[in-house]
Image: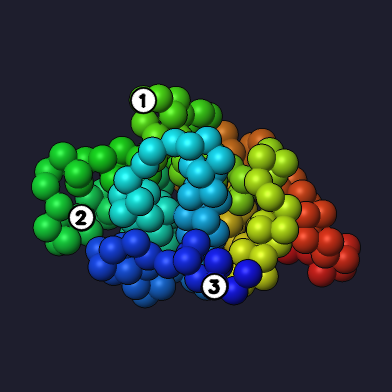
């Protein structure tokens, strides 16, 4: 299982590895683990669907999709997914990606907050949306192998993620009440997701995040 996890979680290209380095430099440990888990869930879902995707593009989007909630990249008026998308565009430009590819990573990150993304129109956008929905809100865990969910999360634990991310989204909602963050905050799905994940991981009630 260890070698399988190493292969699953490894950055697919040098640019992808740089995106992981960027995530670790500017995000909390809980958000770093969330980004890595999101990549794992996205990749596993692609395999289950036999859905072709651009691994480098998806990995970079997964690593950078929540930069907009971090202190260094938060924007006062812009939705956090748009701020994160802008940061990813700048990262992609620095990595030497052509303009069309820069726009794609920005687009994928913005779309991860949509209610759904059509996989036939945007494979990477769909994969990031369903992966983050699983990791944040516990949506449809039955679509993934239970043992793999547990193994990845042992490697990259949730460790307070629910409370931290709920706080980030609430702060976004207060300042930006017309954005998708406000919808997510009002839904209470983040807290519900923490309970679902506690069940997946068989966490005792007193130790839930």
Q: Are marks 1 and 2 in contact (CB under 8 Å)?
A: no
Placement of the N terminus among the 4 image quadrants:
bottom right
For the view shown, which residue lies furthest in the right direction?
205
**Quick one: 146 or 64, which is closer to the camera?**
146
Q: Label 1 to label 2, Cα distance in Å?
A: 22 Å
- Residue 103 has which mark? none
Provide the residue designation for mark 2: 92
On screen, residue 59 above or below 79 = below
Say which residue appears at 34% left-offset and 62% top-offset.
12
User: Rounded to the nearest whole Å, what is the CA distance between mark 1 and mark 3?
Assistant: 33 Å
Residue 43, percent across and down? 48, 50
Callout 3 crowding tier (Cα within 10 Å): few <14, some 14–19, many ≥20: few
Q: Quadrant of the C terminus?
A: bottom right
156, 205: nearer the viewer = 156
Secondary element at tag 1? loop
Residue 168 visible to the viewer: no
Secondary structure type for disc 2: helix
> In the rendered view, does 10 fall on the left or right side of 208?
left
Q: Residue at x 55, y 67 (%)?
A: 5
Determine the image quadrant of residue 70.
Answer: bottom left
Comparing 110 with 39, the one in front is 39
Q: Position of residue 207 (x, y in %)?
A: 82, 69
The residue to which callout 1 is attached is 121
Among the 4 quarters of the image, the one containing residue 182: top right
Which of labels 1 and 2 is toward the front? 1
Distance between mark 2 and mark 3 Cα atoms:
30 Å
User: Count the marks: how many?
Assistant: 3
- Label 3 sits on residue: 3
- 2 vs 3, front mark: 3
Instruction: Decide which of tag 1 and tag 3 comes sooner along the chain.
Output: 3
């Amino acid at each position: 299982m260890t070698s399988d996890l190493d292969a699953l979680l490894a950055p697919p290209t040098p640019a992808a590895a740089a995106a992981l380095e960027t995530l670790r430099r500017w995000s909390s440990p809980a958000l770093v683990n969330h980004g890595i888990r999101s990549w794992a869930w996205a990749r596993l879902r692609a395999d289950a669907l036999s859905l072709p995707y651009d691994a480098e593009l998806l990995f970079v989007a997964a690593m950078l999709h929540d930069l907009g909630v971090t202190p260094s990249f938060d924007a006062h008026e812009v939705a956090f997914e748009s701020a994160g998308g802008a940061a990813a565009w700048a990262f992609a430009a620095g990595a030497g990606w052509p303009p069309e590819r820069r726009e794609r990573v920005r687009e994928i990150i913005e779309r991860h907050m949509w209610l759904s993304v059509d996989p036939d129109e945007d494979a990477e956008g769909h994969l990031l949306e369903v992966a983050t929905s699983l990791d944040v809100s516990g949506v449809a865990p039955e679509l993934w192998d239970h043992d793999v969910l547990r193994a990845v999360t042992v490697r990259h634990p949730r460790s307070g993620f629910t409370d931290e991310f709920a706080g980030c989204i609430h702060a976004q909602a207060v300042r930006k009440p017309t954005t998708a963050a406000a919808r997510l905050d009002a839904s209470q799905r983040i807290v519900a997701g923490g309970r679902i994940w506690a069940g997946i991981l068989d966490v005792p009630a007193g130790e839930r995040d």
